[in-house]
Image (spheres, rainbow, N blue to C red):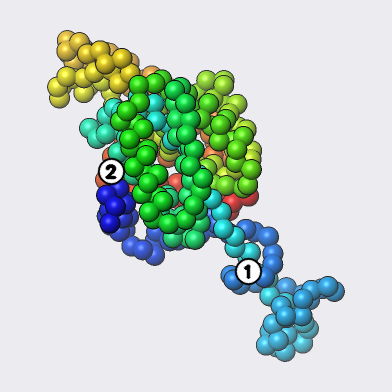
Amino acid sequence: MPAHLVRVKSKLYVRSRRRIVHALDGEYASRSRGRGFDFEDLRDYQPGDDVRDIDWKATARRGEPLVRRHLVTRQRSLVALVDTASTMNARTPAHEDKGDLAVLAVGVLGYLALKHGDRVGLVRGDAGGVVAARPREGERHLEQLLGATRTAIDTSRSAPDLAGVIEHARRRLTRDAIVVVVTDDVEMDERLEQSVRRLAAAHDTLWVAVADANPARELARGEVADARGGWRVPRYLSRSRRIADEHDELTTRLRESLADVLDDAHVSRCRVESSDTAVRELLTMLRRRPYAH
């Protein structure tokens, strides 16, 4: 079995299969009425209704014709928009690799989508450029996407350009899709906010933030280098609680600013810090979502 999916499945199967499947109920079902597979309820017969939809047993009990209503299920695409800038090649508060958590998040959501009969695609990039892979079915395809994401993060020397990645995807996603943005503790500036709002207006959007470690606190565990520039963080900063606290306060403000925009745009969100809790956070985010629009 491919390496990345082995890890994804091992994390998923810690929880019961029933709970995992139910986490996506409603995500991939259209609320329109028609001749789908999932029976929903009964209603009075109206002129023009298909006689094949009449429930004859219920009609006999009531004495008036009743027809079945169904949910129309449809195949959709889940497209992961992944920030692969050099800043993703850093550590989380749980001392794990941010790139590993990003790949895990894409893998979990992609695998669940495949199990629901849907396609999975990828748009990844940074200031150095954007690469897209069309949505397709199959675990082999998903494994290729995960491997490409991991390689892109490992080799990136570019600054983030999440707004550019989102705009690239938005202009090319012509069909209704579920879009998962995977990034870190980004600053929500005006350009990014506009891109997020435009994306959310057109597609069901999820947001997964991979948490950043506090470099001042990480110094106690050894040397710390800037993910972009490679310069070493001075060791004496590890003795400054004030600097560590100020970094925590800045991160909190960034998170609150991001949350305000995402909530206002009706974007479901979660923040992951470790592989031990990532699946739980992802499933909680899915369970809190309303029916897809």
Q: Residue at x 64, y 38 (%)?
A: 201
Please rate how many residues cluster around mark 1, counting C-alpha atoms within 10 Å: few if below 14, some from 14 to 19, many from 20.
some
Return the mark for residue 154: none
Q: Residue at x 83, y 73 (%)?
A: 48
Residue 103 percent across, percent down from the top left: 35, 41
Instruction: Name the foreground residue: 221 vs 82.
Output: 82
For disc 1, the marked residue is 36
How many marks on residues?
2
Q: Is residue 236 left or right of residue 46?
A: left
Q: Is residue 131 left or right of residue 60?
A: left
Instruction: Name the foreground residue: 206 vs 121.
Output: 121
**Image quadrant assignment for residue 65:** bottom right
Q: Amino acid at mark 2?
A: Ser
Q: Amino acid at mark 1?
A: Gly
The answer to whether residue 260 is visible is no
For the N terminus, the quadrant is bottom left
Q: Sequence-wise, which precedes: disc 2 or disc 1?
A: 1
Residue 72 percent across, percent down from the top left: 63, 64
Q: CA distance from mark 2 to mark 1?
A: 37 Å
Residue most extreme to the right: 47
Kind of element beneath mark 2: helix
Return the mark for residue 275: 2
Q: Residue at x 62, y 34 (%)?
A: 171
Kind of element beneath mark 1: loop
Q: Is residue 265 above or below residue 1?
A: above
Residue 129 percent across, percent down from the top left: 47, 26
**From the viewer's perspective, is the residue at label 2 or at label 1 nearer?**
1
Q: Is residue 92 above or below residue 24?
A: above
Q: Residue at x 62, y 58 (%)?
A: 30
Instruction: Name the foreground residue: 17 vs 103.
Output: 103
Q: Is residue 192 above or below residue 42?
A: above
